Amino acid sequence: GIPFWLMHRGGDFLDGRIDEVPACDPDGRISAVLLPHVLGAVLQMAVAIDEPQHTNTDTHTHMDHQQTTAGCPDPERVRVHGTTYKIVLGEPDNTMSERLMSVGSLMQSVGLPVELTTRLRVSVWKKVLANVTMNPITSLTQRTIPDLCAENETRTIIQDIMHEVACVCNKNGTDLGRDPVGDTMKLLANCYPNHKPSMRQDLDTGKRLEVDPIVTAVVQIAQCLQVPTPKLNFLHALISSRDRAIALQHSPICTNTNRQPSPAPTISEGEGGGDSPAAGLCRGQSESGKTAASTSSGEADNGKEELEMDIANVTSSVSSIDLGTSHHVYPDYFS
C-alpha cells in the first residue's frame, strides 16, 4: 500500500500533505513519532503463510531463519511464491545516506537480496499499480492473477485502472518509465501463477481487508492532486462494501452465540377461532415469550438500523462516482 512517509521529504507535490491522505496516517501520529527514524522499503516478492497442517504444492522458496520473534509465524509456514525476490531500500528524502548503506550492508551480509536506491518512490508506485488492482479484483472475483490477465474483459479493466494510477504518478512528478502498465501486466502474468494477494488471503480467512492503505489512500492522493480516477473510484466502492460486509459479520448482532432463544409460542386450547391452529398460534404466545421476543426484536432493530445506514453510505459512494469521460478509452459496460 501507500506508506505514510510518501507524503514527506520527497520534494514533490505530495510533500507535507499527509493531512489530505488520512488513510495513510490518521491524525498524523505515525509521522510525528516515526518519520525521523524510518527507512523506506519495498518488498518485491509474493509471500503467503500456510495454514497449519497444510502442504503447499506450489513452487516456492523457504525463508529459513535460525530464530523467530515472539508472535511471528513458524518460518516453515512462510512461502515466497513466483520468481521475483528482492527488497528495495531507500531514504524518504531520496539520499544515499550512511544509515541506508549500513542497513543494506547488514542485510546483504545475512544473504538477503537487497537493492539500495535514491528513487524509492518509483518502486513504491510500480508496486501500487499491481496491488491497487489485483488485491481487490482477485478478492471480488475469486480468480487467479493469470486468469484475470488472460481474459480480455478483466484485463481491460485492470489496465484502465493502472493507467489512471499512472496519471496520478505523472501529476506528482514521479516518472515510472515508458510503459509501466505494460511492464506490470507482463510481470503479473508470468511471475505469480498461483499466488493469492494479501487481501484475498485475508478474505479467505475471514479477516478485515486492507482497503485503506492499498486502495483508499490512492483515491485520496488522486483527489489531492485533482486527477480523475472514475474506474478506481468504482472499484474502491465495491471492495469497501465487501469489507463492511465482513465487519458486519463480526458485529455483536451476528456473533453473539450466548443469547438465549425466545420460548416457543404456545397454542392455548380454545383460542384460535374455532379449528384454526394458526390463529391460536398468533394469539396464544405466553407473556414470557412476548418479553423475550421484544428484547430480541430490539436488538435486531438496532442491527437493522446499522445495516441500513451502511447500505445508504455505500449507495451514496457509488452514486457520486462520475463514470463519464476520462483520459483513456474504456469498454461500453463502464460508460
Image (spheres, rainbow, N blue to C red):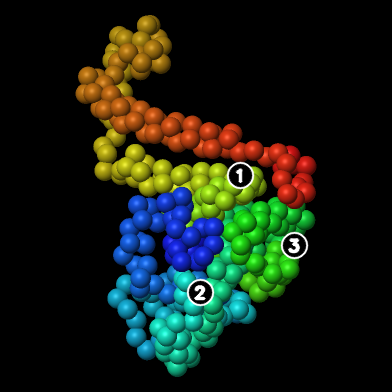
Q: Nearer the viewer, mark 1 or mark 2?
A: 2
Mark 1 surroundings within 10 Å by alpha-carbon count, few (fewer than 14), some (14 through 19), many (20 or more): many
Q: Nearer the viewer, residue 15 or 297?
A: 15
Q: Residue furthest left?
A: 288
Residue at the spot x=46%, y=66% of the render?
Answer: 9
Q: First in sequence: mark 2 or mark 3?
A: 2
Q: Amino acid at mark 2?
A: Asn
The residue where tag 2 is placed is 94
Q: In this picture, is 314 found above or below 146?
A: above
Q: Residue furthest top?
A: 274
Q: Position of residue 86 (x, y in %)?
A: 55, 80
Q: First in sequence: mark 3 or mark 1?
A: 3
Which of the image's four quarters has the C terminus? top right
Report if the CB atoms under discs 1 and 2 are less than 8 Å apart.
Answer: no
Q: Amino acid at mark 3?
A: Ala
Q: CA distance from mark 2 to mark 3?
A: 37 Å
Q: Amino acid at mark 1?
A: Phe
Q: Nearer the viewer, mark 2 or mark 3?
A: 2
Residue at the spot x=26%, y=37% of the render?
Answer: 260
The residue where tag 1 is placed is 234
Residue at the spot x=35%, y=52% of the render?
Answer: 27
Which numbered circle lies on residue 150? 3
Which quarter of the picture shows residue 158? bottom right
Report if the CB atoms under discs 2 and 3 are less than 8 Å apart.
Answer: no
Q: Nearer the viewer, mark 3 or mark 1?
A: 1
